[in-house]
Image (cartoon, rainbow, N blue to C red):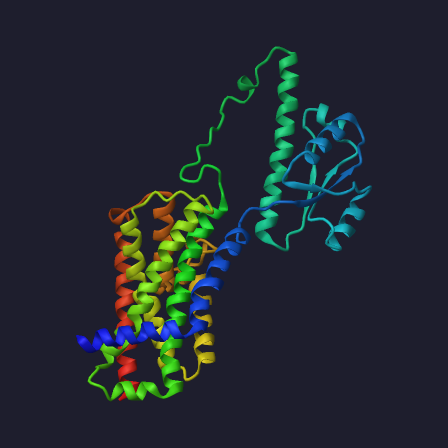
Amino acid sequence: MNLFRLMVWKEFRHIRADKLSIRLMIFPVFAQLLVMGYALTTEVKNIDVAIVDECMTPDSRSLGETIRGNPLLRFHSAATTVAEARRRMDRGEIKAAIVLPADFSRSLAGVSGAKVQLLVDGQDANSANVSRGYLNAIVTGWAQERLRRSLSAQGIRIASVIPVGVTPVILFNPLLKSTWYMVSGLVVILVTIITGLLSGLSIVKEKEAGTLEQLMVTPLSPLHLIVGKTVPYFLIGIAELSVFLVLAVLWFQIPFRGNFFVFLLFGMVYMFSSLGIGILTSTVARTPQQVLFLIWFIMIFFILLSGFFIPVENMPEWVQEVSCINPVRYCMFAIREMFLKGSGIAELWRELLGMAAIGGVVFGASVLLFHRRTR
């Protein structure tokens, strides 16, 4: 036990002497949280839009002014023809165009109603769908307001014509701020990078310096050696997790509705997986560059299959099954649930068991492989 404490103390002194590791733990990580917390957003703003008004009547100009006044759109000069709008879209000047046909006002007064054409740049499917939804909502809102005024002039309430109305109630994130959702997931990714990368680099540096062989001839067992080298990064990960929580609440104004100690429990269980990955990569790799490459390759796989960008439910069934071995998926889901819903162990015990099982397998495999490689 005394040798184990000495091993932990030695690793802390090694970290303190390694200025590069200290910088990696502080400056890049917090800079990533602050910058990416604002940059990673699913919101679509400043959509470049042009209007092709072939009608040039008070009705068409009224709809055009309504579109221009929307703060989510960035209106460009009007196009005279559809062909001109297409050319401007080809050049990347605009992302969407609304075409008001020459018979817009006449059709509007008729029985069948008017048709408006919407051209949307579909290269980015998400932005195209959101842009289409925005413009559809603007046109529909303008049409409903015109109908309301017309019916009011006849003494008819619009509710009698449209008897069913929808009253949306947004729970957990009433302002629909994407930062509330993205930053809580980003916390998991940054903790993974810190614990996995630094623990892997610490062991491979021992290999390069030739001190790993010296440690192996001491009475320390491989298990004591690995635990002694990972405990400092485990404690650093807990500290970083706590600081991330404070930044998310105070800087990004994200409500934390869960229990702090449950939050730390999930983080600690999860770090068995991230630290185990660091040990596995350091066992296979021989240089810090190889560790960086392996960690980066694994992180790409974990992030894409975690639900950070794309909900897991939207993926093909076989991909969803593959993602079941991804510990980031469980931890990210649990942290988001704790932040926004206030969920606890009673609701998230499946995720906790999943992370514990994966962490046990990964950490155990890393110890066995390390023992074989050092025999």
Q: Quadrant of residue 322?
A: bottom left
- Provide residue 234's location: percent of width, then percent of height: 31, 65
At horizontal 29% and vertical 88% (from top left) the residue drawn is 214
Q: Quadrant of the N terminus?
A: bottom left
Q: With 226 as the anchor, is 103 left or right in this view?
A: right
Asked whether residue 365 appears in the rendered view, the answer is: no
- Provide residue 328's location: percent of width, then percent of height: 38, 61
Q: With 283 as the anchor, is 119 left or right in this view?
A: right
At horizontal 63% and vertical 40% (from top left) the residue drawn is 72
Position of residue 67 relative to residue 238, above or below, is above
Asked whether residue 272 appears in the rendered view, the answer is: yes
At horizontal 62% and vertical 20% (from top left) the residue drawn is 148
Residue 364 or 81: which is nearer the viewer?
Answer: 364
At horizontal 77% and vertical 47% (from top left) the residue drawn is 85
Residue sitting farthest toward the top: 155
Q: With 73 as the anchor, is 271 left or right in this view?
A: left
Q: Quadrant of residue 77?
A: top right
- Provide residue 228's location: percent of width, then percent of height: 26, 74
Residue 1 or 38: which is nearer the viewer?
Answer: 1
Number of callouts = 0
Q: With 242 as the anchor, is 80 left or right in this view?
A: right
- Provide residue 165's location: percent of width, then percent of height: 49, 26
